């Protein structure tokens, strides 16, 4: 059963009980008051008739030593006729034998038996479907003691009570019907925040975690709505965070596969060279050494990618890196890309960075430049120091990147021209990886591009001086090689 229906039914039950008891008390209070008034009047009327009888007896001529019964009957008849229409009375002698009774006086003699010389009595009786106040008192008439009884019709009081109950029942039913309609709207209004919370919970159950319940009151239910919305926001944040973690793991798999491609191509090429032809000792050593060096770089890179892409808390091992070593590495890596006119120009110096990661950034930028250029296209890779920073720039004169796409290209798996990128083994992860690595170095990727004129991508690292200013010991060289 709905809460609003429970509230409505409980209110109706309380109203019915309250109206029933209050109506019963009110009608009976009016009835008791009216009946008490009528009874008091009946007793007073009995006293008046008794006084009138005693006065009338005194005016009767005395012919006998004792008041005769026929005289009592005559006086009683006169008293009955002199009063209001419908007056009923009865007179009895000392032995409580009836001497005179009005027509229609059908009361029994129970009250008469209770009445004494100093005792007045009354009661309410039902006779012939009508209600009367039956009173009795003693009358001192000369030397006799008689008993006077009267009946006062009070059926109107009982009829008014019955009418009162009838009217009140109809009014109670009407009030309950009106109250039910009013309480229906009130209960709907009071439970509206609960309905909105239920709706919000069902929307969230279906996966719409951004939906919020509308606040329609400022009471406790309104505060509950605000608390629910705050809980929903926290839940949405947690779910978003979990989705981002899952996406980060997927990105790691794609990024790692992407970064394996270039060194593995070189490793496979040199290995195939060693396998397919006989080389002299010097070339065999160079090939084997290149395979070993690239294998060690892949090992270090896999550990760094695991920290950067998955946990996003990679602690890079920064060291002094000679710019010349970085550019020599680029020359060796892209020495076979003879179809492009790659030009290198740089100032000497040393930067504070993680060598393998910076090489990864430059390799990705240069690889993207090659993909964006046609065969024979010119690509410039430059490096220069300025104001305490060293600026690396990779510039091509290829197809360029539209302005609206530039803010998106560092997103994982985003590719401006998907067909072209896929045809050249692109995965849309290179620049995303570069952005993560540069953020780890406290740097960012600066992109300048114009469609049809080419693209320039640059970043700045902390410049620590010229190479000859740094003292490299044997331990540092060994550590660099192991990294």
Image: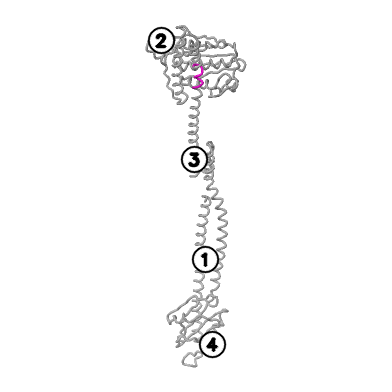
Which label lies toward us, 1 or 2?
Answer: 2
Residues shaded magenta: 256-263
Which label lies toward us, 1 or 3?
Answer: 3
Q: Are marks 1 and 2 in contact (CB under 8 Å)?
A: no
Where does the C terminus fall, quadrant-wise?
top left
Q: Secondary structure at mark 4?
A: helix
The numbered disc on residue 228 is 3
Q: Are marks 1 and 3 in contact (CB under 8 Å)?
A: no
Q: Are marks 2 and 3 in contact (CB under 8 Å)?
A: no
The residue tagged 1 is 27
Q: Could you tell which of marks 2 and 3 lies nearer the N-terminus?
A: 3
Task: Look at 51% across and 74% down and name the residue there.
Answer: 41
The residue tagged 4 is 74
Task: Tell me how far mark 4 sits from mark 1, CA to CA.
Answer: 44 Å
Task: Look at 43% across and 82% down and name the residue there.
Answer: 116
Question: For the residue carrying disc 1, how many other residues have a C-alpha within 10 Å: few (<14), some (14-19), or many (20+)?
Answer: some
Classify 164 as above or below 84: above
Q: Are marks 4 and 2 in contact (CB under 8 Å)?
A: no
Classify 260 as above or below 206: above
Which label lies toward us, 4 or 3?
Answer: 3
Which label lies toward us, 4 or 1?
Answer: 1
Horizontal and vertical percent position of residue 163: 56, 67
Q: Are marks 4 and 1 in contact (CB under 8 Å)?
A: no
């Amino acid at each position: 059963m709905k809460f609003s229906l429970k509230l409505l039914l409980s209110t109706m039950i309380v109203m019915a009980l309250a109206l029933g008891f209050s109506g019963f008390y009110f009608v009976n209070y009016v009835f008791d008051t009216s009946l008490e008034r009528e009874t008091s009047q009946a007793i007073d009327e009995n006293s008046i008739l008794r006084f009138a009888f005693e006065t009338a007896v005194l005016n009767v001529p005395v012919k006998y030593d004792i008041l005769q019964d026929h005289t009592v009957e005559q006086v009683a008849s006169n008293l009955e006729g002199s009063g209001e229409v419908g007056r009923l009375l009865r007179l009895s002698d000392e032995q409580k034998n009836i001497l005179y009774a009005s027509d229609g006086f059908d009361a029994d003699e129970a009250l008469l038996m209770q009445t004494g010389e100093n005792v007045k009595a009354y009661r309410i009786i039902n006779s012939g479907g009508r209600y009367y106040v039956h009173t009795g008192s003693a009358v001192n008439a000369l030397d006799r003691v008689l008993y006077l009884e009267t009946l006062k019709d009070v059926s109107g009081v009982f009829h008014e009570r019955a009418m009162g109950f009838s009217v009140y029942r109809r009014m109670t039913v009407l009030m309950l019907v009106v109250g039910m309609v009013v309480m229906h709207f009130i209960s709907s209004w009071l439970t509206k925040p609960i309905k909105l919370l239920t709706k919000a919970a069902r929307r969230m159950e279906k996966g719409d975690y951004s939906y919020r319940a509308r606040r329609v009151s400022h009471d406790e239910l309104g505060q509950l709505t605000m608390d629910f919305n705050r809980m929903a926001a926290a839940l949405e944040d947690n779910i978003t965070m979990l989705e981002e973690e899952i996406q980060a793991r997927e990105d790691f798999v794609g990024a790692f596969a992407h970064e394996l491609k270039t060194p593995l191509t070189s490793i496979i090429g040199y290995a195939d060279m060693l396998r397919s032809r006989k080389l002299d000792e010097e070339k065999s050593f160079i090939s084997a050494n290149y395979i070993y060096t690239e294998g060690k770089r892949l090992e270090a890179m896999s550990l760094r990618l695991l920290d950067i892409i998955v946990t996003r808390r990679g602690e890079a091992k920064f060291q002094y890196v000679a710019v010349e070593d970085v550019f020599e590495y680029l020359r060796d890596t892209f020495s076979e890309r003879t179809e492009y006119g790659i030009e290198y120009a740089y100032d000497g110096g040393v930067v504070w960075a993680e060598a393998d990661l910076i090489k990864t950034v430059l390799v990705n930028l240069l690889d993207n430049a090659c993909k964006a250029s046609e065969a024979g296209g010119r690509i410039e890779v430059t490096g220069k120091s300025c104001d305490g920073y060293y600026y690396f720039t990779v510039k091509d004169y290829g197809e360029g990147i539209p302005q609206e796409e530039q803010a998106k290209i560092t997103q994982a798996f985003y590719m401006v021209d998907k067909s072209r990128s896929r045809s050249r083994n692109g995965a849309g992860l290179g620049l995303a990886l570069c952005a993560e690595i540069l953020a780890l170095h406290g740097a960012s990727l600066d992109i300048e591009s114009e469609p049809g004129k080419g693209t320039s991508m640059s970043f700045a690292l902390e410049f620590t001086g010229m190479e000859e200013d740094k003292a490299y010991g044997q331990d540092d060289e060994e550590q660099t090689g192991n990294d």
